[in-house]
């Protein structure tokens, strides 16, 4: 008769022996995915007027009639970021030009990102983005 030496059923600890390693592993993974000081902000967030995509090497912001290239977004100890990007494309009657600087700052609040637009954009203030992508590139005519 062949016995299975790895059988949990025959182990005196049963599943309890796996509890500590599994819990520690889960905590380590969740900690690695949680934004913190000096860590890059990674992911995609959107609202009905903006879409922000952040990767380790670059970030991008898409607004109606405007696309901005950004450096990677690094968070401070308050989960805030501040960066100046470059306008990559402009359409319509936006009072900005391709190549203009575009300052952007924001903060991670739970699973959302709140961004503050520069004063140069008329009628713009802050926007709260939720996880996921939305196509906001359509420029009203």
Image (cartoon, grey):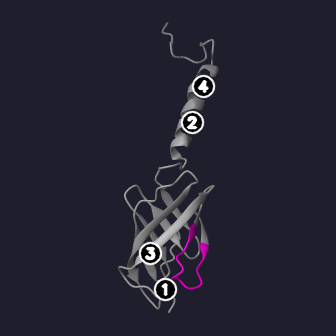
Secondary structure state at the residue bearing disc 3: strand
Question: Closer to us: mark 4 or mark 3?
Answer: 3
Q: Mark 1 points at which residue?
A: 139
Q: Name the residue under label 4.
A: 20
Mark 1 vs mark 3: which is more N-terminal?
3
The answer to whether the residue labelled 2 contacts the one labelled 1, judged by CB atoms less than 8 Å apart, is no
Mark 2 vs mark 3: which is more N-terminal?
2
Q: How crowded is mark 4: few (under 14 residues within 10 Å), some or many (20 or more)?
A: few
| Alpha carbons under labels 4 and 1: distance apart | 53 Å
Q: Nearer the viewer, residue 134 or 61?
A: 61
Q: In this view, does 3 lie above or below 21?
A: above
Q: Name the residue under label 2.
A: 26
Mark 4 vs mark 3: which is more N-terminal?
4
Q: Residue at x 55, y 17 (%)?
A: 7
Q: Where is residue 131 shown, x and y percent of the image?
A: 57, 61
Mark 2 vs mark 4: which is more N-terminal?
4
Q: Mark 3 points at which residue?
A: 102
Name the magenta segment's main secondary structure. loop
| Alpha carbons under labels 2 and 4: distance apart | 10 Å
Q: In this view, does 20 lie above or below 120?
A: above
| Alpha carbons under labels 2 and 3: distance apart | 39 Å
Residue 57's label in the rendered image is: none
């Amino acid at each position: 008769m062949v016995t299975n030496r790895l059988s949990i059923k025959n182990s005196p600890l049963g599943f309890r022996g796996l509890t500590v390693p599994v819990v520690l592993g889960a905590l380590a993974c969740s900690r690695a995915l949680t934004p913190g000081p000096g860590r890059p902000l990674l992911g995609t967030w959107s609202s009905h007027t903006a879409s922000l995509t952040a990767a380790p090497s670059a970030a991008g912001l898409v607004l109606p009639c405007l696309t901005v290239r950004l450096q990677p977004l690094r968070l401070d100890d308050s989960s805030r970021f501040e960066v100046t990007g470059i306008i990559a494309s402009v359409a319509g009657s936006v009072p900005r030009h391709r190549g203009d600087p575009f300052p952007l700052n924001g903060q991670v609040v739970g699973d959302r990102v709140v961004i503050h637009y520069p004063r140069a954009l008329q009628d713009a203030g802050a926007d709260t983005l939720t996880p996921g992508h939305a196509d906001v590139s359509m420029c009203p005519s």
